[in-house]
Amino acid sequence: MPVITGRHNNSDIFLDLGIIDADAIDITDPTKQLTHIPTPNMFRALVDTGAQKTMISPRVIAALNLTPRGRILVSGVGPTAHYHNGYFFHVAFVVPMIPPGTVIPPNVPTTVQAVVHINTQVIYGGEIPSTGGSFDVLLGMDILATGLLTVQAGHFAFAY
Amino acid sequence: MSQQQQVDENLKFFVSELPKLSQTHMGQFALLRNGAITDFFSTPVDALKAGKSLYSDGLFSIQQVTDVPIDLGFFSHAGHNGAS
């Protein structure tokens, strides 16, 4: 089971993940899915176990030129709810392949090999209009429930 | 008509029909085109597949028959909501 690990700040958990347009993977012909896997665009995500769905910012939508496929009713502050544009996409986790003992100097551009794991579940998630710029994906329970999230003092791990 | 216009026009019709649809298709995903419902599906992906195979111009939209909004936890309650 691949694992993503990192540090948290005792308040939020952020991680980097890839988003792939669901249209880039032909869901009408599953046999094609393994022959053409596009390189995911990478974005910073906020892990939110209180979010029922994974949501994406306008920056993700613009970068991938995603097509709105409907509107999703999302709760707001208090009794209010609003319809947000909904998009189909895949979430991908990218794990760098760094041999044990390798020292990567800080602030020096370095190329490392990485393995891309694409979550096979197609996500139908909505647009979040404003994230304050600190993240572009709200990683919700539709993805988190497919793996095991562990939070410990200073660290987190997500096995999937 | 752009895809966004298609989505918005279909939403207007869908919202007007929602009270009626809730009694017969609660939880299902409606496939819409030109302000009318084509069919209902159990998952959004099934509705997407049908829309793609029925409409080569890609002009369609999908709405879940529900009046229960998605909760975004902290994000919902932090007041970031601003969509129409």
Image (cartoon, coloured by chain):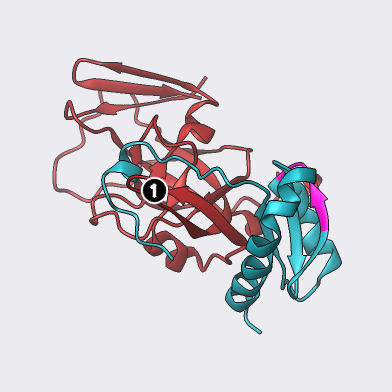
Chain colours: A red, B cyan
Name the image quarter holding residue B27. top right
To which chain does the residue with label 1 belong?
A
Q: Is residue A118 magenta?
A: no
- Residue A29, given in percent of the width and then of the height, sits at 81, 50
Instruction: Give the camera-side residue of A147 and A68.
Output: A68
Inspect the image, locate mark 1, and give the three-letter code of the amino acid beneath it: Val
- Residue B80, given in percent of the width and then of the height, sits at 29, 53
Residue that label 1 marks: A137
Q: Which residues are magenta?
A: B39-43
Residue A27 visible to the viewer: no
Residue A104's place in the image compared with A74, above or below, is above
Q: Is residue B42 magenta?
A: yes
Name the image quarter holding residue A127. bottom left
Residue A142 visible to the viewer: yes
Instruction: Give the camera-side residue of A41 and A36.
Output: A41
Q: Is residue B36 left or right of residue B16?
A: right
Q: Is residue A151 left or right of residue A147?
A: left
Residue B71's place in the image compared with A60, above or below, is above
Residue B36's place in the image compared with B27, above or below, is below
Residue shown at the point (62%, 50%) measured from the top left: A37
Give neighbour class at mark 1: few <14, some 14-19, many 20+ (Cα, 10 Å): many
Instruction: Give the camera-side residue of B29 and A116.
Output: B29
Callout 1: SS: strand
